[in-house]
Amino acid sequence: MPYIALNSKDEEVTASQCRDEFLRTGEVLSGFRCAFCLCAYHPRYIYINGMIGRTPHFFVKGEKHNGRCDGNPLGVVAETVSGTQGKRIPDDNFCFPEKLVARAKPRVVASLPDGEKLVLSDEEIRSRRLRAGKEYGSTTFTSSLLEVIVESKNKISTWCYSQSRKQKLTKEAEKKLLKETASSYPLQLFDQKGLTYESAFWNAHYERTKTDKRIFQAKGGTVTVSSSGFVISSQPSAPSNGGNESKKAVPRPVEVHYHRESYDSNTPPQAHVKALAELANVAAGETIQWYAYGEMRLHEDKLIIRVETLDHLYFRKEKKFTPRKAS
Ligand SMILES: [Zn+2]
């Protein structure tokens, strides 16, 4: 499945990168070509909203790759994949990003002559594919947006809940299915390898003694917006009285802190403008469920998570439950 292309500006891009930029800025590019043999490419699962579980990629239509090219890099060294096989959603096309990565800038390749269609030699095509194999590795689906990762996790959970209903599972068995299925999908967080869609997530009310970053999650967040950023606060629900409280970790209040970030063009992408506007609109009495990627630290009795970019925050308003009037 080809995922590396040249765009109309002769920049080398990946399908995942184009998808992220579409979600961040609404940017839709065309005029893609194979990065190795230059045949025309078309995007699939890139410029489309709400498509979760499908790998963004390029394809050829009515044309063929030149020479011995098939659009894929050569000499790719396979990485050891974390996660256990077996408890996967039984659909081969059902794929999720395997890495949360830094937002990549398009790679500018040597500009190609204008005008006449350039034909590359077999040797040149081969060396381009080998270079890409070294540079990109074996992961074809990545994302720099937490939203894409969280929605993938939600898709896994939704599938598990539907299975649970079909098979009439007990709560305990349902929990086990959720855990085993999420554990079978690898998810590298920047340089942290060996994690999965289960272990990369962490309940934000519990302290992490290590400083390695995780995707923290909590509900019931209230928002305080300032001129330089915002704070989201969530209170833990009362700990269950299992009788063994002294041995259990204590749930604590947690806060997400964000301060303005800098942008190359000084203009925030539309997704960030929208997120800030939505947070500012969380009215008194309303709450959000949130996910934040960052490092956690304990400050007095409160846990603090600092988010460096809005690409690493994802939230949605929670439904309000209005108590029914007694009749
Ligand atoms: Zn090609």
Image (spheres, helix red, strand yellow):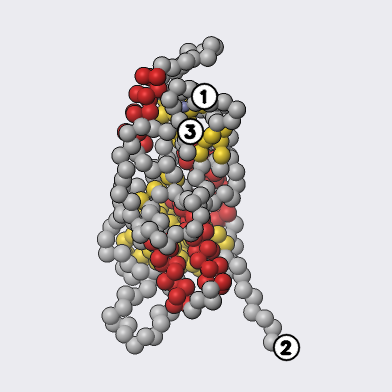
- The answer to whether residue 34 shows anywhere in this view is yes
Residue 166 in percent (x, y) is at 56, 71
Please tell me which residue is depicted at 31% across the width and 61% down the height of the picture: 297
Q: Which residue lies most toward the right here?
A: 327
Q: Earlier in the sequence, mark 2 or mark 1?
A: 1
Q: Which of 10 and 167 is in front in this view?
A: 167
Q: Which type of secondary structure does the marked residue at label 2 adopt? A: loop
Q: Which type of secondary structure does the marked residue at label 3 adopt? A: loop
Label 2: which residue? 327
- The answer to whether residue 215 shows anywhere in this view is no
Label 1: which residue? 39
Report the mark closest to the observer, 3 or 1: 1
Residue 120 in percent (x, y) is at 43, 17
Please tell me which residue is depicted at 35% across the width and 23% down the height of the picture: 127
Q: State which quarter of the image contains the C terminus.
A: bottom right
Q: In which quarter of the image is residue 35?
A: top left
Marks 3 and 2 close (CB-CB < 8 Å):
no
Label 3: which residue? 265
Residue 261 in percent (x, y) is at 43, 44
Please tell me which residue is depicted at 31% across the width and 64% down the height of the picture: 208
Label 3 Cα crowd, 10 Å radius (few <14 / some 14-19 / many 20+): few
Q: Quadrant of residue 216?
A: bottom left
Q: Earlier in the sequence, mark 3 or mark 1?
A: 1
Please tell me which residue is depicted at 39% across the width and 48% down the height of the picture: 99
Report if the beta carbon of the residue with label 1 is closer than 8 angstroms to ligand 1: yes
Q: Which residue lies most toward the top here?
A: 116
Q: Quadrant of residue 47?
A: top right
Amino acid type, callout 2: Ser
Q: Label 3 vs label 1: CA separation?
A: 32 Å
Q: Which of 235 and 86 is in front in this view?
A: 86
Location of residue 20 with respect to 241 vertically, above or below? above
